[in-house]
Image (cartoon, rainbow, N blue to C red):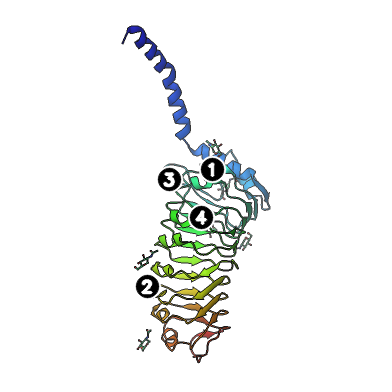
Amino acid sequence: MGNVTRFILALMMAVLLPHFVVSFSTKTTTNINTDQSALLALKACIVSDAQKILKTNWSAATSVCNWIGVTCGSRHQRVIALNLSSMLLTGTIPSQIGNLSFLTSLDLMNNSFYGFLPDQFTNLYRLKHIDLSWNNFYGEIPYSFPKLQYLSLRNNIFAGEIRSDMFEHLPRLQVLSLSLNKLSSEIPMGLFKCKELQVINFEYNRMMGGILPKEIGNLTMLRILRLGGNMFEGQIPSDLFERLPKLQRLDLGGNQLSGKIPLGLFNCKELQSLNLDSNKLEEILPKEIGNLTMTMLEVLDLDNNLLKGKRKTGGCYFS
Ligand SMILES: *[C@@H]1O[C@H](CO)[C@@H](O)[C@H](O)[C@H]1NC(C)=O
Ligand SMILES: *[C@@H]1O[C@H](CO)[C@@H](O)[C@H](O)[C@H]1NC(C)=O
Ligand SMILES: *[C@@H]1O[C@H](CO)[C@@H](O)[C@H](O)[C@H]1NC(C)=O
Ligand SMILES: *[C@@H]1O[C@H](CO)[C@@H](O)[C@H](O)[C@H]1NC(C)=O
Ligand SMILES: *[C@@H]1O[C@H](CO)[C@@H](O)[C@H](O)[C@H]1NC(C)=O
Ligand SMILES: *[C@@H]1O[C@H](CO)[C@@H](O)[C@H](O)[C@H]1NC(C)=O
């Protein structure tokens, strides 16, 4: 290599290197100021704040860590939790929410937030807890969070099909509530990859339906299963309850289920509440029902079926 070539190379390095360093650092460095601008963007999307909570309290003059509803982590001094539940807020969620990169918990329940959740929402890969219940969100359900344990979208206006791969990317999910929306799909098979699920609530979507997948029975941690007020049909799979020893609450009421109540249900010794009303279940009420009423059962509702067996009374509530 000649001296001239070397000189030109060195010159190019000298000119280009700082450029690389600068562009690299602006891409990766986020800090508490990033969190502040994300939260100010959220504040700007609030169209009604009846109690003037954010209006007066979320002031750029004080650290975001002192703002109402905001929690910062002690290690990085970054926003780790945002809780604006029950604050009478109306507004939308801006794309800047995706810049709250240390966020582990988001609770906006019981407000009047509306609209789509921005694509950038799925950048929040540290989230463990999302509660958006009792708002007016619609559009695509957020679906890819490697650490998410709790997801409640109860009482919003999410409609249509649940995307088939929705649950493939929620490996740690323990609590799932999509009840009181307008969903119309079957239960996606990917759900049964969420081995840690303890609570499933799809109640009152009215249009969710299809056959009950027997794979529900593989979710051995399940404590609560609520599918009432939908259009599930066909027989309850006979082995559905063989491996659900922790089941405490089962609500399949208000569907189109037919056939017999599987005897395996009576292996669920922890069962406290059983609601199968308003279906087309038939045949004799199994005498094993007595095994439940002797133990934990507090609520039993089998009304409006085609059952012929005798009802036992005593100790528990028969509606
Ligand atoms: C905002 O609210 C927090 C918590 O109630 C309080 O500690 C803080 O002083 C308030 N800040 C302002 C600027 O009102
Ligand atoms: C949010 O705040 C409310 C009221 O203080 C509280 O009941 C709720 O548990 C909080 N949510 C989370 C996720 O901690
Ligand atoms: C919802 O928010 C309103 C207004 O803050 C409050 O009065 C009500 O108790 C809240 N409901 C629930 C279920 O938290
Ligand atoms: C935050 O998010 C917005 C929109 O997603 C983006 O344009 C912006 O550059 C991001 N970064 C910072 C540091 O605010
Ligand atoms: C459910 O469990 C059965 C029996 O252990 C197994 O053969 C089947 O592959 C499991 N299904 C799913 C979807 O995990
Ligand atoms: C119900 O209880 C009786 C008497 O304890 C017992 O013989 C029977 O095996 C039990 N049935 C089931 C399904 O657990």
Numbered disc 1: secondary structure: helix
Disc 1/disc 3 C-alpha distance (Å): 13 Å
Q: Name the N-terminal-most of marks 2 and 4.
A: 4
Badge 3 is on which residue?
A: 74
Q: How dense is the environment of label 4, judged by Cα within 10 Å: few (below 14), some, or many (20 and up)?
A: many
Q: Name the N-terminal-most of marks 3 and 2.
A: 3
Numbered disc 3: secondary structure: loop
Q: How many marks?
A: 4
Name the spot of residue 319 as percent of width and height, x first.
57, 84
Placement of 88 over or under 260, stated as above or below: above
Placement of 33 over or under 250, stated as above or below: above
Point out the frontmost of discs 2 and 4: 2
Disc 2/disc 4 C-alpha distance (Å): 29 Å
Residue 66 appears in view: no
Looking at the rendered structure, the kind of residue marked 2 is Arg
Point out the frontmost of discs 3 and 4: 4
Residue 130, numbered label = 4
Badge 1 is on which residue?
A: 64
Q: How dense is the environment of label 2, judged by Cα within 10 Å: few (below 14), some, or many (20 and up)?
A: some
Looking at the rendered structure, the kind of residue marked 3 is Ser
Name the image quarter holding the N terminus: top left
Q: Name the N-terminal-most of marks 2 and 1.
A: 1
Name the spot of residue 292 as percent of width and height, x first.
43, 83
Numbered disc 2: secondary structure: loop
Name the spot of residue 19 as percent of width and height, x first.
45, 22
Numbered disc 4: secondary structure: strand
Residue 243, numbered label = 2
Query: What residue is shown at x 39% (from left), y 72% (from top)?
Result: 244
**Residue 318 appears in which quarter of the rendering?**
bottom right
Disc 3/disc 4 C-alpha distance (Å): 21 Å
Looking at the rendered structure, the kind of residue marked 4 is Ile
